Amino acid sequence: MSSNIFASGCSSGLLPRSAPPQARTDERRQNGVIKKDSSSQEDLSFQDLTSIEKERRQLLLRSELPFWRILSYYRGTSLRAVVSDSLVWTTLLIYVWIRWRANTIDYVPAAVAMMEKTNVNILGGFLSFFLVLFVNQTNDRFLEMYGFSKACSGRIQDIAGVAKTQLPYEVADRLVCHFNAAHIAGYVGLNAIGQGSPYSKSNFFDHYNAKHHLLTKNEMKALSHHDMDNSGLCMKELTTWCQLDVAQARKDGHIDSYQEKYMHDKILAFRAAMDGMYDYTDQPPHFFYIHFLVLLSALYLPLFAIDTAYAAGWGADKAIGLDILQGLIVFLQCVFVVGLRSLATNMIDPYGDDLEDLSVINYVEGTLEICSTIMNARQE
C-alpha cells in the first residue's frame, strides 16, 4: 500500500454507477445558470496562472506596510484604473482649457456670474452616497464568495478526516480523490458563466489530475460526456460519485448510518457552497445600477471641473498657484469617483485573472496538501 494517496492515485475500486449515455449533452442552461460562449477567451497557461497567483499573494501582504511604501506601488492600485480612464483626462482637459482661457484675457466674462448661481455639490453628494453604497454591496458579495471558497475546502477536509479514521485506506483514498477532483472541476466550470474564468480543463484540471492522480483514465472517460469548460455538471457528477462512495461504504459495513448521514451532510454542504459561487457569478449587480453610476459620473466630473475652473479667479483675481491647487482638487475628485467605481467593479467577479481576485490556486493546493497530511497521518 502506498504511503501517499496523491502519488498512488485512485486506481482501486469500481467506477460509480453507469454514466449517462454519450448522446446526452449539456444544454444551454445548466446548473441553474445561463452558459456563455467562452470559445473566444484566450487560455492562460498554468505558468501564467501561478505567476499571477504569486503576485496576488504578495499583494495581500502589502496592507500593513507604511503609507510611503504603499504609495510607491502602481500595479494592483486605484492609480492604474484612474490613469487609464478617459473620463479623468476629459475632465482635466476641460479644467485646463478654461484656466488657459482665463489667463489669456483681462476681463471677467458674464458666464462667471452665472456659474456662481449653480451648485454642483448636491449632485456630488448624491453620487458619493451611491458610490459608497455600491462599494459596500460588492465588498459584501466578494467576502461572501470568499467564504464559499473556504467552505468548500473545509468540507473536503472534514470528509478526509472521517474517511481516514473510519474507512479502509483504499476506500478512503478513492473518496478523497473524487472530492478533490470535484473541487477543481467546480472552478473550471465557472468559465461557462459570468465574465468567465482563466481556469480551464487543459491548464488547470489536467495539471492537478496528472500531478496527484485524482481520477483514473476510465473515470475520466466516464466524465467525457460533460464539457467541463462550459458547464458545472462535471462537478455535480463528481460530487454524486462521492455520495455513492459513502453509500457503498455503508453497505460494506465500514460505517454506520449516523456516520453515513454526517458524511452526506458534508458533501451536500460542499455542493451548496459551490452552487453559491455559481449563483453569485451568474447574477452580478444590475447593469441598470452600474449604468446609472457611470452616467452620473460622466455628467458630474465635467460639471465639477467647469465649476471649479470658473471659481479659480478671473481678471485681477487670477493666480497660477491657485490654478494649480484647484487643478489638484479636480484630479482628487476624479480619483475619488473613478477609483470607487473601479474598486466596486473589480470586486464583482473574484474568480478572474486580476490581482485583486481570490487566490484559487492557493485554495486548491492548500486543500490537496492538507488532505495528503490527513491521509498519511500515523499515530505511534
Image: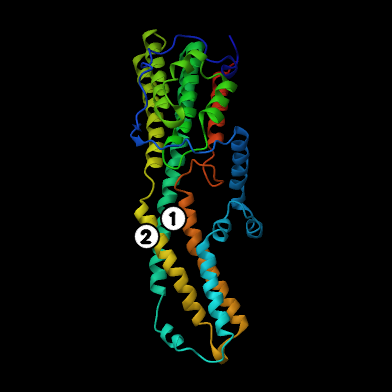
Report, in whole angstroms, how far the alpha carbon at label 2 lies from the one at label 1: 14 Å
Q: Which residue is mark 2?
A: 292
Q: Earlier in the sequence, mark 2 or mark 1?
A: 1
Query: Residue 22 appears in which quarter of the rendering?
Result: top left
Residue nearer the viewer, 163 or 330:
330
Q: How far across and down, in percent of the image, does residue 163 sit?
A: 47, 18
Question: Which element type, helix, strand or loop, lies under badge 1?
Answer: helix
Asked if the residue under mark 1 is in contact with the one under mark 2, i.e. CB atoms within 8 Å, the reply is no
Q: Look at the picture and state if 51 lies above or below 267.
A: below
> Is 97 on the left or on the right of 276, as rendered?
right
| Disc 1 residue crowd, few under 14, some 14–19, many 20+, Cα 10 Å | many
Q: Amino acid at mark 2?
A: Phe
Q: Amino acid at mark 1?
A: Val
Query: Residue 78 appears in which quarter of the rendering?
Result: bottom right
| Disc 2 residue crowd, few under 14, some 14–19, many 20+, Cα 10 Å | some
Quadrant of the rendering where the N terminus is positioned: top right
Quadrant of the rendering where the C terminus is positioned: top right
Residue nearer the viewer, 171 or 208:
208
Question: Which element type, helix, strand or loop, lies under badge 2?
Answer: helix
Q: How far across and down, in percent of the image, does residue 224 sit?
A: 45, 20
Q: Look at the picture and state if 200 lies above or below 255.
A: below
Q: Which residue is mark 1?
A: 135
Name the outermost residue toward the front: 40
Q: Is residue 98 visible?
A: yes
Residue name at image x 39 percent, y 29 percent: 271
